């Protein structure tokens, strides 16, 4: 099981006593899906969703981070894409996302031998964009009409950020 330490966060597998919360936040109330989600967290399962870790801060669950890539991914070898969610508004703006991004990115470069780690977010998501930049990611441009609600697919522009092996080797501590 993978467990990573940041300056203020611990990235760890979800625990069985968090299944109900996972069901409510992640699987649309589907408890069976939540049980599978929790059981597979902290490992690289043979499925495209990749590594999923809980974000813990101050001894409580505050969010999750995903690293999509690896052998079951459609990405080329050594390329990973991150997704992150800080669940409650009150937990945002405290550096939690930045700390989690730095910890998981360092792991991907150092242990999984990544050559590129990327993430994207809605162009108007200033908090996530700031976290990406503080974690040492470089803004690469806009993915026009990239994502949107099912009723309007492709209706939202996304900003793309990435760190490369060269970036990491020049500043291994993150941002």
Image (cartoon, rainbow, N blue to C red):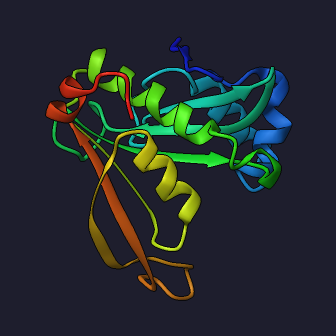
Residue, x 45% and y 43% (percent of image)?
A: 134
Q: Is residue 152 visible?
A: yes
Query: Whole-percent x and y of residue 165?
Result: 17, 31
Drawn side of residue 164 relative to residue 12, left or right: left
- Image quarter hosting the C terminus: top left
Residue, x 65% and y 31% (percent of image)?
A: 55
Query: Whole-percent x and y of residue 124?
Result: 52, 73
Residue, x 35% and y 40% (percent of image)?
A: 136
Query: Whole-percent x and y of residue 125?
Result: 55, 66
Report the front residue among 86 and 14.
Answer: 86
Report the front residue among 24 and 4.
Answer: 4
Q: How many discs appear?
A: 0
Is 145 situated above or below 117?
below
Query: Whole-percent x and y of residue 102?
Result: 45, 31
**Quarter of image, res 58:** top right
Is 113 situated above or below 155?
above
Residue, x 82% and y 50% (percent of image)?
A: 90
Report the front residue among 82 and 49.
Answer: 82
Is 133 situated above or below 105?
below
Drawn side of residue 161 relative to residue 19, left or right: left
Is 70 situated above or below 68?
above
Q: Is residue 29 visible?
A: no
Drawn side of residue 31 relative to residue 117, left or right: right
């Amino acid at each position: 099981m993978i467990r990573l330490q940041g300056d203020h966060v611990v990235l760890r597998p979800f625990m069985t006593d968090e299944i109900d919360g996972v069901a409510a936040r992640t699987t649309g109330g589907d408890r069976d899906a939540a049980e599978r989600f929790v059981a597979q967290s902290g490992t690289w399962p043979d499925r495209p969703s990749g590594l999923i870790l809980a974000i813990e801060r101050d001894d409580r669950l505050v969010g999750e981070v995903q690293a999509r890539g690896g052998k079951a991914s459609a990405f080329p070898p050594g390329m990973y894409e991150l997704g992150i969610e800080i669940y409650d508004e009150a937990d945002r703006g405290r550096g939690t996302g930045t700390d989690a991004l730095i910890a998981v990115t360092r792991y991907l470069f150092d242990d999984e031998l990544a050559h590129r780690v990327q993430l994207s977010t809605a162009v108007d998501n200033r908090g996530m964009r700031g976290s990406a930049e503080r974690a040492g990611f470089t803004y690469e441009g806009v993915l026009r009409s990239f994502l949107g609600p099912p009723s309007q697919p492709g209706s939202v522009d996304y900003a793309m950020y990435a760190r490369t092996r060269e970036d990491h080797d020049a500043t291994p501590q993150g941002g």
